[in-house]
Image (spheres, rainbow, N blue to C red):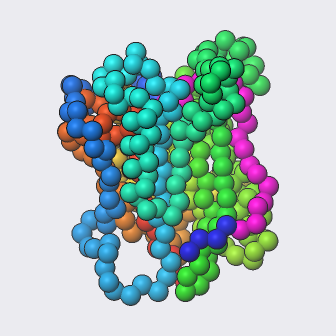
Amino acid sequence: MLKALPPLPFHRLPVASSKRQHSLFLSNAKRIRCSRMSTNPAPICPKFIPAEGGGNINSTSKFEGIRFSLVSYNILAQVYVRSALYPHSPSACLKWKNRSDAVLTVLKSFGADFLCLQVLFIHLYTVFWGGKKKGGGGSWSKKDSRDHGDLNDPYVRLKRDCVGIMAAFRLKGPFDHVVIVATTHLYWDPELADVKLAQAKYLSSRLAEFRTQVSDRYDCVPSVIVAGDFNSVPGDKVYQYLTLRCPKSATLVECIEEYPIPLCSVHASTRGEPRFTNCTPDFTDTLDYIFFSPSDRIKPVSILELPDADSPSVVGCLPNYYHPSDHIPIGAEFEITKD
C-alpha cells in the first residue's frame, strides 16, 4: 500500500524556451536494421523478469519486507508526431486515437506502483492551454531555441523547457519505509552537453535538499529513486556524474557539495545497460535510466523485459504498432528489508 506524505516544497528545474525533446538528432548513434515493419496492431506488453537471471519473481517463499515496482516511459507526445519525421511508421499507428489506446493498454499491463512518464502530457498541455484554435485544438511552434538569443549568454543558454518532479511516499508493510521518487527529462541537444550536465547537477542538489527535509520531518532515512529520459548515453558526462562515487581522498564536505546523492543504475548493477531505449532510423541508443541510492536495505529484484535489436517488434524502428513511442519502457521491482 502506498501513502503519499504531506506535500513539501515543489522542486522544478530552471525552464523557459521549448524545443523538440526527443533525440532524433543525437550524434554517434548505434544503428539497427530498418525495414518496413509488420502491420500487426497489437501493442507489446512487457513483463518483469528476474534482475540477475534465473530464479522466479513469483516465488511463494515468504518475504518479510516491502516490494514495489516502478516503470519509466518516454511516450512521444502527439504534438511531435509528423509523418515527415516518422516516414518509417505506418500512418495509422501515428494517429492519436490509435496511439492513445495502445499507450493505455501498455500502461495498464504493468500494474506498477509508480509510473514516471515523460513528454506525453505536452500533448494535453498544448490542446488545453497552448493554442488559440477553436474546437479544443492547440497550436505548436517548433522554433529552434537558438532563435531566442545569444547562446554565449549563460542566462539564454541554460533556459530550457525541462522539468524535474519529486515526491516522498510512505510504503506500508511489515514496517514503514519512506521512498523518494523523482523523474526528469533532460535537454536533448548534443551540442549543448554542458546544459544537460548543469541540469543533472541542479536536479541532484535539489534532490539532496528534499531528502534532508523528508529525513528531518519524518525522522527516517528515505531511499531515493530517479528515473526518466536523461538524453545521455552510458558513459557520457551526465551518466558519469550521476553514478560517480566520491574519491577516497576527498573530504566529507567536498563529497556532499560535488556529489550530493550517489546513485546506481538498476540495469548496470544487474544485467547491464540496455543496448537501446530509443529506436529511430537516425538514432538508436540508450537514453533512459532508473537510478537508485544503493544501500543494504534496497535492491532491484526484477526488471522489465526489453526487446532485442533483431526483434520483429523493433525492426523497422519506432513508433509502430508494437510500440506507440520512439522509446521503449524500462522498469524495475525493488525489495526493501528492515534494518
To which quarter of the image does residue 48 belong?
bottom left
| Residue 115 in picture, x, y percent from top left | 52, 55
State the residue in front, 279 or 128: 128
Quadrant for the N terminus, please: bottom right
In the drawing, does residue 168 fall left or right of residue 38? right
Q: Residue at x 38, y 87 (%)?
A: 62
Q: Is residue 19 above or below residue 69?
A: above
Quadrant for the C terminus, please: bottom right
Residue 31 belongs to the span the image colors magenta: no
Q: Residue at x 59, y 84 (%)?
A: 175
| Residue 293 in picture, x, y percent from top left | 56, 63
**Camera sees residue 247:** no
Q: Residue at x 73, y 14 (%)?
A: 149
Main secondary structure of the magenta stretch: loop
Over which residues does the magenta segment extend?
Answer: 5-22
State the residue in front, 42 or 246: 42
| Residue 130 in picture, x, y percent from top left | 68, 26
Q: Is residue 89 above or below residue 104?
A: above
Q: Is residue 197 above or below residue 190?
A: below
In the drawing, does residue 90 fall left or right of residue 287? left
State the residue in front, 265 or 244: 265
> How many callouts does the rendering have?
0
To which quarter of the image does residue 89 belong?
top left
In the drawing, does residue 90 fall left or right of residue 195? left
| Residue 103 in picture, x, y percent from top left | 42, 44
Residue 11 belongs to the span the image colors magenta: yes
